[in-house]
Image: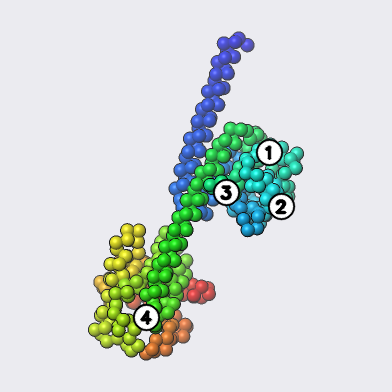
Amino acid sequence: MPAKKMDIEQWLNKFKRIEEKLKRLALLSQLSQILNSTLDPKEIRRRAMEAATQLMKAEAGSLLLVNEEKRHLYFEVALSEREEDIKTIFLNFGEGIAGWVAQHGKPLIVNSPEKDVRFFKGVDERTEFKTRNIICVPVRVKEKIIGVLEAINKKGKRRFNKEDLSLFTSLADQVAIALDNSRLYHELEEMFFQTAESLAEAIEKRDPHTGGHTKRVTLYSQAIAKYLHLDPSETKWVKITSVLHDIGKIGIEDDILKKPEELSPEEFDIIKRHSTIGAEIIEPVRQLKEVIPGVKYHHEQVDGNGYPDGLRGEDIPMLAKIVAVSDTYDAMTMDRPYRKAKDKKVAIEELKRCSGTQLDEEVVEAFIQAYQNGEI
């Protein structure tokens, strides 16, 4: 073959390799953006595995996370036909390719696993899956290994190489960032919930007749939410609204709040202000704007006879409707100085009677489903 023709072919092959590398780098960038576009830890883990198999052009893959207390790895996500079987397997540190990577903190390519003493055959035996080759890298947060990412069987019966290892390591770094961001976010969110619950409990202590009311309403509301097919963000707002629904009682005088007898019409008008006061307290907190309608309108009724604005039917926010049912049930099933608590079955019948007039039918039905399934 003439030298010039050889040079052209070499140049074309080199160009193709560069083009392929650029495409993979662009894919890595795209996958990194997808990974970091959510704070849901389960979704991040699922996306991490999809990214691993896509970027490595592999048949399957796994994300194993570290259980520090038990010093082993567990399969959090495993994309293959036998995913559920794989998730029942645990690897001790140092056991298998993944265990070795977790223990030593070094990436590893094994293109002939049957010849490598570190290879753990138990997964293949359990799943009837044949591992031809494997690439495995540590997932590290601030020098701390939290798991390992692996891709198995490069498609086309090809072998993993150093370029794969470089890209896979970069992907693992992005997975680590996404998981750590999610962890920090949920820690802050949990701290907020605990603060809100402490505030609600402090307010409840002013009223000797409603101990534990907020916790029960929150429990009931979350149980209702399961049967209304709400999205995760709406479910989160259900919890926060339930915790804060009576925060406005901080603005009600003790002699009314603690009165052991039934309230007079004038006193009841005063206590009705708590829903509006609660909304006013929350309003300056920009992050809680979604909660305001639920706090303000949880005493509205679908027939328009509620307060503070006499809203009807669909004009009442769903958050408020959910809290209204939970609040009503708890009020009926707890003792008051001037009346005894109703039996739970009697309270359920009362909810049914008020369905479509005072309370929303769909929410009452969801409450009853949760009750029948032992969640209330």
Comparing labels 1 and 3, the label whose residue is closer to the camera: 3
User: Element type at marker 2?
Assistant: helix
Within the image, what quadrant is residue 52 found in?
top right
Q: What amino acid is at disc 4?
A: Asp
Task: State left or right for residue 70 relative to residue 362.
Answer: right
User: Element type at marker 1?
Assistant: strand
* Residue at 35%, 61% in the rendered image: 288
Mark 4 or mark 3, which is nearer the start of the sequence?
3
User: Element type at marker 4?
Assistant: loop
Comparing labels 2 and 4, the label whose residue is closer to the camera: 4
* Residue at 46%, 62% in the rendered image: 190
Graded by Cα atoms within 10 Å as few (under 14), some (14 to 19) or many (20 or more), the crowding at tag 2 reads few
- Asked whether residue 63 is in view, the answer is no
Mark 2 or mark 3, which is nearer the start of the sequence?
2
Mark 4 or mark 2, which is nearer the start of the sequence?
2
Q: Which mark is residue 126?
A: 2
Where residue 183 sits in the image (x, y, percent)?
49, 54
Where residue 19 sits in the image (x, y, percent)?
51, 27
Within the image, what quadrant is residue 340 found in?
bottom left
Task: State left or right for residue 282 relative to residue 365.
Answer: left
Marks 1 and 4, Cα distance to the nearest angstrom? 67 Å
* Residue at 57%, 22% in the rendered image: 13
Where residue 260 sits in the image (x, y, percent)?
35, 88
Tell me if residue 201 comes above or below residue 291 in the rendering.
below
Q: Which mark is residue 144?
A: 3
Marks 3 and 4, Cα distance to the nearest angstrom? 48 Å
Q: Which mark is residue 110?
A: 1
Marks 3 and 2, Cα distance to the nearest angstrom? 30 Å
